[in-house]
Image (tube, rainbow, N blue to C red):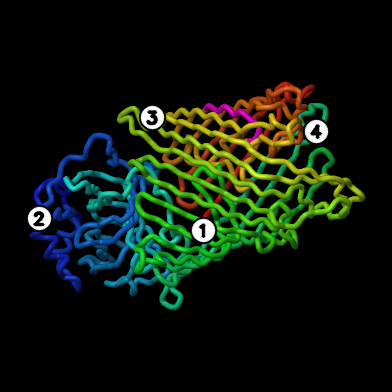
Amino acid sequence: MTPPRPRPLAGTVLGLVLGLGAAHGQQGNPGAADVHAVGAEVIADLDETSVTRSEPGAGLVGKWLKASGRWVEQRFEASRAEQRGPLKDTAGGRVTGQIDALGPEPRTFLVGPLLVECTDSTRLVGLTVEQLVPGAWIEARGRLTAPARLVADAVHASVPGRGEIVGPVTAEERRTDGSIVLAVLGVDVVVPVGAPTYGTDLARRPDEKRPTKHRTFSVFGRPLTIGGHVRTRTRYMRNFDLDNATRDDELDVNNRLHLEAFYFFTPHVLALVSARFVYAPDFEFLDGSRTDDKEIVRREHWLFVGDILQRVLGPGYSLQIGRQKIKEERRWWWRRNLDAVRFHYDRPKVHLELAVAEELAPEGTATRFVSPDLEGVLLNLGNAAWAWKEGHRLDFFYLYHFDHSGQHSIGQVVAPRHDDESDARLLWLGGRSSGQIGWGELGDLSYGVDGAWVGGRERVFDFKTIDPAHERISSSTSHDVGGFAIDATGTWATKAPARPALGLGYAFGSGNSAAKHGRDSAFRQTDLQRNRAPFLGVEAVRYYGELLRPELSNLHIFTAAVGFRILGSSSVELLYHFYRQDTPAPFLRSAKLDADPTGKSSLVGHEWDLVFSLREWERFEAQLIPALFLAGPAYGSFSGNLAEMVFMRLKYTF
């Protein structure tokens, strides 16, 4: 059976009224003619609402969209819509929903008007052929062989009540009431007024982002999803001390096995448990030594309860308790697993989250104590986001860091591993403006501007070594803290062959120009940041440099980049960074070089990163990054010397 080409969305609905309406009314065992109509005629019933062509600049045709919502008769009504980017095979797609009826052909069934066909090569995960009956909730992904006909590569058991459709947009209409009708997989998706469709959602709730690559089983009638990934990361580092007279080459290998399990008690109540097993050999070429680190790391383990106040205040209020990943899009503020209680509020144009966190146990088996920089530290943080215009958002961030670990006394003896060099009470405040502007055939412009201020009071301790196992606190000083930072980026992604893209960035973190007055005016980041996000390619990169990897403190960082898309879903990009200290100082906060500046010059140096990111397969990812750092006059006699690094990451998800 090959359905004919569907009529345009703005055309007549006669075929739908005569064919689809009758077919949908027969939920038991529709006849062949009815199923043929359902599979072929995917024109939305527009309820006599007039439709106009979409206004210039809407630009969703050809882009991938993920819509969440529910099936209503022969259309999908979206409550959320998220643009995924045109990176996948445009012949593929995914649908999640309830089987409405069996098809006339063997091993076919209907989800709404979409006809799903199973073949001998279709994988069934968490269910059997006998369970593919009307009323079953499934998720099918595969190839679109005709409009509204999906040949499934895999069919998973799904969470009851969850409806999703993912695929490229092939047609677009805008109603006079402001809603949008999109054709996705040959099915009409109605996006109401107020639901964002450009760029990603402000946030994705845990109950709406179940991993699609893992295996699902039925336990007590509810889905249990189990999976994980294997990842190996290799970093070869040469001349990180910038001394050409020594051979300090080092090879760092980090192998990880990550396992996790999701269990849905209800569609909006779920739990996650995950752990990581690490084996990390480290080779020193200078003395031929080798160290092997083995550790079991506790990752996320939490309970999420969605829509907890729906009957009182309406939908959108959720609570998450346990060790959880707290992150934001650019990871400039935070991206870390913390023991926390977090409150979420999510609506189409507003996102709010508030969290209280404090480490309750060691992160892994490597130590029997909480890391000194987090022990006794209470964190109160929040993020509010507003999609003020389609494709544009404003964010506000705050973090209060309250160290109540107890005051150390002069002369106290501690083990080096328990060194806590400072106690502080600090407040970070800031915001971000970001978005994307369509330039038609010229491509898309993206921008982002972050600004932050930190203030508070800090007490710093000095230590003297007694023996390899003990240190004595020799002195302490207290000072006020007050600094600021700004980070601005802009990219232009063209539509030319190979999709060339250009990017520019400038970041500034204030230096300690007020040191003589007993005040630290240097900005420091939150210690929860990663400074890692996609720039021009398909994978995240360290946008302050893969080799130097400094914290934005007492620094000017200028960045320029050019990138290309290669193959189907891969990319290559070249990034250049120039570093200059705001105030000459004999250190770079959190930098990975073994050498320190002299404090006599502010010109730190230059870095070049060449990033190859490969994402051609569903489960396998690879990244290769060679990098060079050229030392500047800030390194004194080492000025002009090179540090080199080659980084490789391989990941397989199962």
Q: Where is residue 54 in the image (x, y as percent from the top left)?
A: 21, 40
Where residue 192 appears, x then y in whole percent?
Answer: 25, 52
Q: Residue 247 carries which label?
A: 4
Q: Name the residue under label 2.
A: 15
For residue 194, above or below residue 240: below
Q: Is mark 1 on a helix, strand or loop?
A: loop
Left or right side of 589 for 540: left
The answer to which of marks 2 and 1 sits earlier in the sequence is 2
Q: Which of marks 3 and 4 is nearer the N terminus?
A: 4
Residues at marks 4 and 1, CA–CA distance in whole angstroms: 40 Å
Instruction: Out of 195 and 92, give the one closest to the viewer.
Output: 195
Q: Earlier in the sequence, mark 1 or mark 3?
A: 3
In the image, is residue 382 above or below residue 488? below
In the rendered image, the vertical position of residue 590 relative to residue 5, given as above or below: above
* Amino acid type at mark 3: Thr
- Name the residue nearer the viewer: 122 or 64: 64
Task: Give the residue at the far bottom of this rendering.
Answer: 220
Q: Which of marks 4 and 2 is nearer the N terminus?
A: 2
| Cα gap from disc 1 to disc 3, whole angstroms | 34 Å
Q: What element carries label 3?
A: loop
> Which residue is denoted by mark 3 in the rendering?
494
Mark 2, residues whose alpha carbon is within 10 Å: few (<14), some, or many (≥20)? some
Range drawn in magenta: 553-560
Amino acid marked by disc 2: Gly
| Secondary structure character of the magenta stretch overall | strand
Q: Is residue 327 above or below residue 74?
A: above
Residues tagged 3 and 2 counted as in contact (Cβ below 8 A): no
Which amino acid, mark 1? Answer: Phe
Location of residue 603 in the rendering, given as x and y in whole percent from the top left corner: 68, 23
Q: Quadrant of residue 495?
A: top left
In the rendered image, which residue does mark 1 sit on?
654
Front-lying residue, 47 or 252:
47
